[in-house]
Image: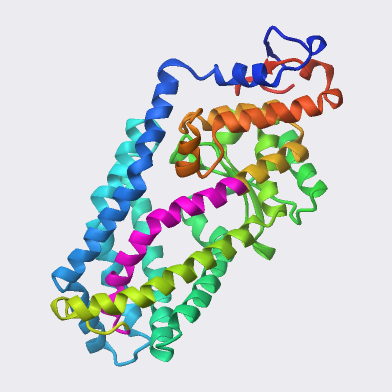
């Protein structure tokens, strides 16, 4: 393996700060400015996105579109459980069209502006249409259940709505790897070889019950590297995207996969589901209190007077969009904590500190690498590049005697350095 060595050596003692700085200094000049600008520009996207959503839902209410859609569903069928499902069709479709300019800016034009997307506009619209279809189906199911709960338990629907949301979220986690994700990308079994062998070796050491590794053709969409251990029970699947496979070396791939296995072994999916359930409970309690008051004040103008009327859906969504801004900051902190736990797990599982640091630098191509403490607290759902590289170098310092002699020096491993 070719190595770029810094001045200090193991004989002089391993300097964690110097090693960290050696990595951080590989991102400089225009590349660093671009990364900082991209990420800092995203600080306000959740707020503006919430505002765009609120405006679109307000339009549905202001022009009585929502009431008309509910009336149409009532004329088509008298089955109360089916009416919200019919309502979901125009509600989801028109909602997507109203917010389409914003989606185009955030997901297509801005990504191309910073060189993060590989899609042309036709390809983007194809995927937009696929996910719109998925959204119509999932929204129809969700609204049918929520409004059935509201009708059956007017005083406790906030509680049963939370339970229903938790169950539906668990089902989505279970079925998404098998039925939804393949709609956008092709999952191909990884060919036999050293990379696959090492991934499965680590997986079996960690007692992850799978013998399959898949490669995802994410390069048709983005330049980002990614991997996951997704699913629950029979749908567990180890996958890495082709960007990671093509841009990294064996050490980097092992580091990433060790991290992703950490999410599985530390039960982060189940914990996130629990956190989402708590946030849903808070959200439903607030909407239980706020939505009737809004309908009492504005319902006649909107043509929607009852909470049990599917036409009230935009009112719910406005309240939830407002709550989603602080809720998102809180949830980011939870995810960031989980990511840090998975980082520590991955370092122990893969034992590739320089591979881990290299990957942290790759991720810093689109995440500000050295944010202020308040920035990382408010806007990061992953630890910053500096935090991750420093963790890797601290781990290396503690385990220096266990590493091969050539890895005990302060060095900087780049993605182009392929393992022999």
Residue 281 place in picture, x, y as percent: 49, 71
Horizontal side of residue 338 vs 138, given as left or right: right
Residue 175 place in picture, x, y as percent: 56, 65
In what quadrant of the picture does the C terminus appear? top right
Q: Residue at x 21, y 65 (%)?
A: 58
In this view of the protein, which residue sits in the foreground, 31 or 116?
Answer: 31
In the depicted structure, whether residue 186 falls above or below residue 396: below
- Principal SS element in the magenta part? helix
Where on the picture, by quarter, is residue 366?
top left
Q: Residue at x 72, y 53 (%)?
A: 265
In this view of the protein, which residue sits in the foreground, 319 or 268?
Answer: 319
Residue 231 appearing in the image: no
Residue 405 appearing in the image: yes
Q: Which residues are magenta?
A: 308-337
In the depicted structure, whether residue 85 falls above or below residue 107: below
Residue 2 place in picture, x, y as percent: 70, 14
- In the image, residue 27 lies in the stretch drawn in magenta: no
Direction top: furthest residue: 7
Horizontal side of residue 225 vs 39, given as left or right: right
Horizontal side of residue 300 vs 19, given as left or right: left
């Amino acid at each position: 393996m070719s190595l770029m060595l810094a001045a200090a050596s193991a004989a002089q003692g391993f300097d964690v700060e110097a090693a960290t700085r050696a990595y951080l200094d590989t991102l400089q000049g225009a590349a660093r400015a671009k990364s900082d600008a991209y990420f800092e520009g995203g600080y306000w996207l959740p707020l503006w996105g919430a505002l765009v959503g609120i405006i679109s839902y307000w339009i549905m209410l202001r022009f009585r579109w929502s009431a008309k859609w509910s009336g149409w569903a009532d004329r088509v069928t008298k089955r109360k459980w089916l009416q919200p499902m019919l309502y979901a069709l125009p509600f989801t479709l028109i909602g997507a069209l109203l917010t389409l300019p914003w989606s185009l800016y955030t997901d297509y034009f801005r990504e191309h502006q910073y060189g993060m997307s590989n899609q042309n506009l036709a390809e983007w619209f194809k995927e937009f249409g696929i996910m719109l279809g998925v959204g119509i189906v999932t929204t129809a199911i969700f609204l049918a259940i929520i409004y059935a709960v509201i009708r059956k338990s007017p005083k406790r629907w906030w509680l049963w709505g939370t339970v229903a949301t938790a169950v539906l979220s668990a089902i989505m986690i279970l079925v998404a790897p098998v039925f939804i994700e393949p709609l956008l990308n092709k999952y191909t079994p990884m060919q036999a070889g050293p990379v696959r062998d090492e991934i499965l070796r680590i997986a079996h050491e960690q007692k992850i019950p799978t013998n399959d590794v898949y490669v995802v053709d994410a390069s048709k969409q983005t330049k980002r590297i990614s991997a996951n251990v997704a699913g629950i029970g029979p749908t567990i699947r180890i996958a890495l995207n082709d960007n990671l496979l093509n841009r990294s070396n064996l050490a980097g791939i092992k580091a990433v996969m060790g991290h992703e296995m950490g999410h599985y072994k530390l039960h982060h999916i189940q914990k996130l589901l629990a956190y989402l359930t708590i946030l849903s409970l808070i959200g439903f309690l607030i909407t239980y209190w706020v939505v009737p008051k809004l309908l009492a004040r504005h319902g006649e103008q909107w043509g929607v007077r009852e909470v049990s009327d599917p036409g009230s859906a935009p009112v719910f969504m406005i309240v939830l969009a407002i709550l989603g801004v602080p809720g998102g900051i809180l949830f980011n902190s939870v995810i960031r904590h989980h990511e840090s736990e998975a980082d520590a797990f991955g370092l122990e599982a893969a034992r590739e500190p320089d591979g881990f640091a290299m990957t942290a630098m790759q991720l810093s191509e689109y995440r500000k690498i050295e944010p202020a403490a308040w920035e990382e607290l408010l806007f990061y759902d992953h630890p910053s590049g500096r935090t991750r590289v420093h963790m890797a170098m601290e781990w290396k310092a503690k385990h220096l005697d266990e590493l091969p002699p050539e890895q005990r020096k302060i060095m900087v491993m780049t993605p182009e350095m392929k393992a022999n």
